[in-house]
Image (cartoon, rainbow, N blue to C red):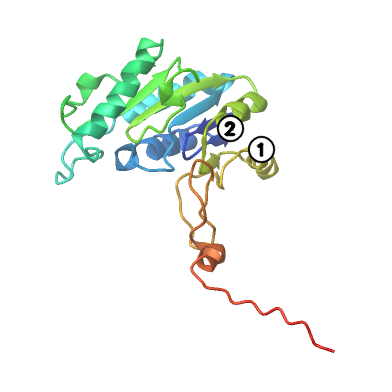
Amino acid sequence: MTWLIGKLNGTPVALNPFCVIEMPAHAAVWGAFFNAGQSCCGIKRIYVAAPLYEEFVAGMVDLTHRYRLGSPLDPETTIGPVVRAAAAASVRAQVHDAVARGARQLIDQAAFAASTPGTAYLAPQVLVDVDHSMPIMREETFGPAVGIMKVASDEEAVRLMNDSDFGLTAAIFSMDTARAESLGDALETGTVFLNRCDYLDPALAWTGVKNSGRGCTLSRVGFEQLTRPKSYHFKVAI
């Protein structure tokens, strides 16, 4: 069994059951909520193997409740507002739609007093009982909301992770490098991380597949797109 954590336009993650659960839970919360969830490669969909599901979800909820929503000017703030009130309303609409379709919210919004409808301040949210009939699991959610699904096998997790119009990054958490590489080969993403998420390395190409953009930045491959090649094709006259 393997467990996987993933995001639509960004990061799917696979974890070995023998991996210490605290590390991937911390990474998943950070990947989902840093910059108020406003990252093209942040974690938005989470897939967890059944034996690890309850423990992982409990860890996600506990860590999420430790965030403090507030002004970026306040040194006590650990999660700030999204870019504008309309963006917060869009995320709220996705969450409300998921709940109407049967999802459950695990984060009490009352614990985040600054989260007020009509403003850009939006509390982080963890959803369970989600499925791929819900837009929040199929569309880009550019804010602090994440859905978690239980899976029975590697194959089911990979199928769900690839069931997306987007494919920017994937993150795999495992102590088995060979197994992680095999999973990474099956994932339809431009970048695959191991035991981390949302990290840029200037030496590695940054690219996506499907609707996650065209072309490439970073690395030698990225710089080649900024050059103007000149070709000579000579045929020697006899």
The reply, left or right, for residue 154 in relation to residue 142 is: right
**Residue 156 drawn at (x, y percent):** 63, 24
Residue drawn at x 24%, y 21% is 109
Residue drawn at x 51%, y 56% is 216
Residue 65 makes an appearance in the image: no
User: What residue would you read off at disc 2?
Assistant: 162
Q: Depth check: give the residue in front, 179 or 115.
A: 115
The reply, left or right, for residue 146 in relation to residue 202 is: left
**Residue 108 drawn at (x, y percent):** 27, 19
**Label 1 residue SS:** helix
Q: Amino acid at mark 1?
A: Ala
Cα separation, mark 2 vs mark 1, equals: 9 Å
Q: Depth check: give the residue in front, 112 or 188.
A: 188
User: What residue would you read off at disc 1?
Assistant: 186
**Residue 54 drawn at (x, y percent):** 48, 18
**Residue 208 drawn at (x, y percent):** 52, 47
Considering every residue shown, the one lying at the far right of the view is 238
Q: Quadrant of the C terminus?
A: bottom right
Mark positioned earlier in the residue sequence (2 or 1): 2
User: Above or below — where is 131 with respect to 189?
Assistant: above
